[in-house]
Amino acid sequence: MSSEQVTGTRPPRVPLYNDPRVRSVVYQVALAAIIAFLVYGATNNAIEHLQKAHIASGFGFWNETAGFDISQSLIPYSSTISTYGTAFWVGLLNTLLVAVLGIVIATVLGFIVGISRLSKNWLVARVAGGYVETIRNIPLLLQLLFWYNGVLKALPELRNSYTFAGGGIYINNRGFYVPNPVARPGFGWVELVFAAGVIAAIAFYVWARRRQERTGQQAPVLWVTLGLVIGLPFVVLLAAGVPIHFESPQAGRFNISGGIEVVPEFAALLFGLSIYTAAFIAEVVRAGILAVSHGQVEASYSLGLRPGPTLRLIVVPQAMRVIIPPLTSQYLNLIKNSSLAVAIGYPDLVQIFTGTVLNQTGQAVEVVAITMLVYLTISLVTSALMNLYNRRMALVER
Amino acid sequence: MTMAEGDLAVTELHFVRQQQLLPQPAPVRMTGAIGWLRANLFSTPTNMVLTVLIFLLTVWVVRELFDFLLLDAVWSGTDREACLALTQHREIGACWPFVWERLPYFIYGSYPIPERWRVDVFFALLAVGIAWLLWLKAPRRDLGALYFFVVLPILSFILLHGFAAIGLPVVDTVLWGGVLVTIVVATVGIVVSLPIGILLALGRRSRMPTVRFFSTLFIEFVRGVPLITVLFMASVMLPLFVPEQFEPDKLLRALVGIALFASAYMAEVVRAGLQAIPKGQYEGAMAVGLGYAPMMRLIVLPQALRITIPNIVNTYIGLFKDTTLVTIIGIFDLLHTIEVARIDPKWATPVTSTTGYAVAAMFYLVFCYGMSRYARATEARLSKSDKR
């Protein structure tokens, strides 16, 4: 509605209620008012309810003694002296543990299945397709319950444990028990050599890369790295007389002591999450590889590259650009889905916090708010990291 | 060129075929079943090993499934005795009499037996609505949408919950259960999430900063937290937030949680569709003088929604699977009824859990796979019409 109209006459006055700017302001004020009213009403009601029920508010409960047991803890925790705050950290660490391990396993399995689905081998492709279609269409909660109640809890009791490696490994319905490696004096040398090997391998990688850029000559990076990181420490380990001791689990009448204990809740959650998410990652990987135009492969073959290097140097780097954004959302889904732990009793953040702590303190608002904030933070950090990686991988255009 | 003596000698030494050879059939090894096997299963040594290993694995899995579901299964009996390996002296597979006896519970929950016809009618009405919407050649599909999104919810509420004035006794939602609740939760999620999702998507792309802010805040917040925490929020915090006299019942709280969650995901799906519409469409609509609402309703949304159908269906598949989470906040959906039935002392045996889970798995597999086939068919249909 500018004044510089060709005809020179003033445009007819728009009534105020038809002016888009006025309308927009009115709409926005109305929306803000409605939301403010809802929030105000909800807060008032909540305060009234809480006072009537004599429930404390605020975060004072954080430093109170928790008084309940947790079956798996990565940090020292005791039901008699630890606080709700400690219980929170135990839960958060358990969530992160299962999420990180789940992401690693699901990624490896997902890439294998996704690539298998495109295999020229008819049977391999069909079996991979069957896996994806079946797993994707069954709810995760059902799968977790199946792994937990149908498989792990159906294992024999303690007395009839499956025993492997001459009493080194026990498997029964209370979990898996494997030997716990304990370092003896002299193991420090192995660690030292291992650290040196890692540094040397990185240095070699950088040198090989520079040389390849300069001269075009390739160096056997993989074998040198394996030798430096695994081979050399292994030789030192043998030379030092294997200064390591495996503390085997000991089966008693009522329980098993010693060794590393993997509780069935953890195993079920890890299996379930990894297998479920892998099916989705497989689809992401398949779509990514199909998105690389066939001309790229043909060009690579005509340059004389064999199928292996073609996949590694031509197809996968280009496919990664398509794969990473949806892969990120699968990782986020896995992290969020780990909260289903509550259904099988694995002590993750949701089970400890919105389960036990909420029941004991009754402070629903604070507890649910903290839990949601933690997941929001994890989600934001994960997507920020993946965006960073994505920016490095993204196509550099003019 | 004249022919010299030497040249003749050369022609005599070499044999040149005078007539064309007829093309021979390809070697047997390269065609037919054998050729197919060689090309697809045994092309390289690695492939041979893979094929054999995967074949053995497949045979093992199929045999175990076959044995469990059919061969070793128990087909008749009245209680757990029939499904106990100890008393039957044989390998025991699925315990089908357990499923058979509990089937009404799995379908209707504790819905009063004389009133169960109402649930059957609800299933039939829903089936009509779905068929009307999905079957492309159905008459008056606009009426179908009206029926599905407006008439059906009202009718279903009256039917399932009851309406004393017309002689339908009220059935408390505590008694609802099984497949009924699963379907109700999924359908409410579907019916509510699409309109709210569209509004949120439009809000997120709005030019009004306040609207955009609140839409984005809601979408990102809900998508950043697990569904289970949204459900916890709905079940423990919602009653705090509303005045005491309106205390929502348990199922309604779960429905609110599911609907909010699904709306946020639907909003992002719709937004992707909106972004795919070329700018010229918006400009064209404005150029012919359409305001915001008519432009969206007549020009943009029909195109955007059409190309989003496959993604909308995929979101519904996720929603359908996610309905199982209401189990955790104590709603008796199909999975919860199975959880309850499998530990009932009358039937508790080592195989009862697995049998129950197998039934649930087949239920979800059939529904979700059906939906994903539909999504794929739609995708194929759309890409065909795009190619022209």
Image (cartoon, coloured by chain):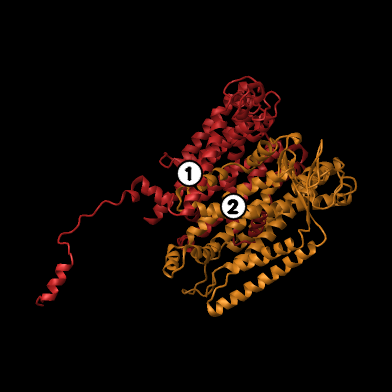
At which x and y percent is residue A176? 73, 43
Task: In the rendered view, tell whether residue A39 sits above or below residue A145.
Answer: below
For label 2, the SS is: helix
For residue B15, what is the image quadrant? bottom left
Q: Residue flagged by tag 1: what amino acid is it?
A: Arg
Q: Quadrant of residue A253?
A: top right
Left or right of residue B302: residue A66: right
- Locate residue A371 relative to residue A5 in the image: left or right: right
Image coordinates for residue B203, horizontal then vertical, percent: 60, 56
Residue A109: image tag: 2
Q: Colour of chain B?
A: red
- Tell how many labels: 2
In the depicted view, which residue is nearer to us: B22 or B156? B22
Residue A359's label in the rendered image is none
Q: Secondary structure at mark 1?
A: helix
Would you say the residues marked 1 and 2 are in contact, meaning their CB atoms lie under 8 Å apart? no
